[in-house]
């Protein structure tokens, strides 16, 4: 067996529609070359993965620095807008070095939760006051390096953030987010280079943060590179009201007019939509990334995920502000939120929820060859313990139910990225003390 060739024996494997016992997976150069069910015993030399193995999970929406806010902003009264002021104060203290340390620890926490790829919605570009660093992409490069050191893939969604509202310049806090205009944004992020573990995508922070006449510039940059394009969409009713006042239409309608919607675009949150908005998003093939733990933490509301999917919008999941990093919880919450909203049960199968957390999430980030256990796919595997206090009991026939409705991130025992063990027996192999790294990085920002 060479260093680039490995064999894994999976005690139970979810293969997209059902669970198979005793599956052998052969890997070469980071990709699956063969999947052999009906293997009752491990072949000689195979590495044994006890439990339920799934494809690697994709966290389609992350703001890594928000992790520093966990446990400090969950209590007290207020709204999204008051929370935002606390978030800005944290952003003000970031440097390339402190952001690298924090992101490395956050991405390691994601790996411990079974996440093998992250979409980083990145808008903290410059030094406070808006002065570019000597390397104008120093902050983005810090995130790309952090992902490599944590052993996960990243799609850096370099974000255009140019104004504080319709017709208003950036606030003092927002100056470090802004490149001045979309052409300057495009020039800066065109310098970023993709790597084996990193892809470069684009993002429009929101319709309030990019002037309407500059939306097409960002969309065209992504289209020319066939890159993912993400946008915060209708997260707040106040934004919808302001958009109607400024442009006489909803944010989704404004994005459609300027060519932003389409199959490589993902709307994040998509919470407060009209029936026409839902039809526009679904009919254009635009994806929807739901972030239920953040949406409830910020009291944003419950988005029409089921209606969007029924109209043709692929669903993905993200942990967004990282109040929780657990895609099993995000998947479970999407179904349970819909039950609360409609007072009926069973809107998605467990398998459909797992696809949102894996294959469809990877596709939203431009990794179409990940998120499944099959020949030709990237060898990304996540193994859940089936003997914890949460998962103990008979394995459900499909197995997906055990993952979505019983397991949590704490049940992840192994995370394999490109055939390499990043988490083994619940411990990160590259970042030995993830809790310590998180504590140190957060303390550095609070000092």
Image (cartoon, grey):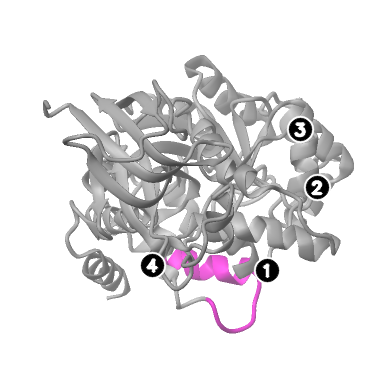
Image position of 311 (left or right of 109): right
Q: Residue at x 28, y 37 (%)?
A: 8
Does dot 2 land on a helix, a strand or a loop?
A: loop
Q: Residue furthest bottom?
A: 76
**Callout 1: 10 Å neighbours few (<14), some, many (20+)?**
few
- Write down the residue under mark 2: 273
**336 lies above or below 281:** below
First in residue order: circle 1 vs circle 3: 3
Q: Residue at 53% of width from left, 45% of height from top?
A: 357
Camera-nearest residue between 153 and 129: 153
Seen from this angle, which residue lies furthest left?
2
Cβ atoms under marks 2 and 4 closer than 8 Å: no
Horizontal and vertical percent position of residue 94: 32, 59
Question: Hey, which residue is sitting farthest front in the picture?
Answer: 40
Res. 282 mark: 3
Local secondary structure at mark 4? helix
Mark found first going from the N terminus, 2 or 3? 2
Q: Quadrant of residue 335?
A: bottom right
Query: Magenta residues?
Result: 74-91
Per the model, the C-alpha gap separating discs 2 and 3 is 12 Å
Examine the image and state in which quarter residue 132 appears: top left
């Amino acid at each position: 067996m060479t260093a680039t060739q490995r064999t894994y024996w999976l005690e139970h494997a979810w293969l997209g529609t059902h669970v198979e016992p005793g599956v052998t997976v052969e890997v070469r150069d980071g990709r699956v070359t063969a999947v052999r069910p009906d293997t009752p015993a491990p072949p000689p030399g195979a590495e044994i993965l006890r439990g339920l193995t799934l494809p690697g999970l994709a966290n389609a929406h992350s703001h890594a620095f928000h992790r520093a806010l966990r446990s400090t902003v969950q209590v007290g009264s207020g709204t999204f807008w008051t929370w935002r002021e606390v978030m800005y104060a944290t952003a003000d203290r970031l440097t390339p070095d402190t952001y690298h340390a924090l992101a490395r620890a956050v991405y390691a926490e994601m790996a411990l939760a079974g996440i093998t790829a992250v979409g980083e919605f990145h808008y903290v570009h410059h030094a406070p006051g808006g002065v570019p660093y000597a390397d104008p992409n120093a902050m983005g490069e810090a995130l790309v390096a952090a992902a490599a050191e944590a052993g996960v893939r990243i799609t850096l969604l370099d974000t255009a953030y140019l104004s504080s509202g319709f017709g208003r310049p950036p606030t003092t806090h927002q100056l470090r987010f802004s490149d001045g205009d979309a052409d300057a944004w495009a020039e800066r992020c065109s310098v970023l280079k993709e790597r084996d573990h990193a892809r470069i995508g684009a993002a429009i922070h929101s319709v309030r943060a990019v002037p309407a006449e500059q939306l097409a510039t960002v969309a065209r940059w992504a289209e020319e590179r066939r890159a993912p394009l993400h946008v915060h969409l209708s997260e707040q009713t106040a934004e919808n009201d302001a958009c109607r006042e400024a442009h006489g239409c909803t944010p989704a309608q404004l994005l459609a007019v300027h060519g932003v919607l389409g199959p490589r675009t993902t709307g994040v949150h998509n919470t407060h939509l009209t029936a026409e908005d839902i039809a526009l998003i679904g009919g254009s093939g635009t994806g929807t990334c739901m972030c239920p733990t953040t949406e409830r933490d910020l009291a944003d509301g419950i988005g029409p995920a089921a209606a969007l999917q029924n109209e043709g919008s692929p669903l993905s999941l993200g942990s967004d502000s990282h109040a929780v990093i657990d895609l099993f919880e995000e998947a479970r919450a999407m179904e349970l939120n819909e039950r609360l909203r409609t007072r009926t049960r069973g809107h998605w199968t467990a398998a459909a929820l797992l696809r949102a957390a894996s294959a469809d999430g990877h596709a939203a980030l431009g990794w179409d060859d990940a998120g499944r256990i099959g020949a030709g796919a990237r060898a990304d595997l996540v193994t859940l313990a089936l003997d914890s206090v949460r998962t103990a009991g008979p394995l459900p026939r499909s197995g997906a139910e055990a993952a979505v409705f019983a397991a949590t991130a704490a049940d992840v025992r192994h995370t394999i990225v490109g055939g390499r063990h990043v988490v083994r027996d619940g411990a990160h192999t590259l970042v030995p003390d993830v809790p310590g790294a998180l504590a140190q990085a957060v303390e550095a920002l609070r000092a």
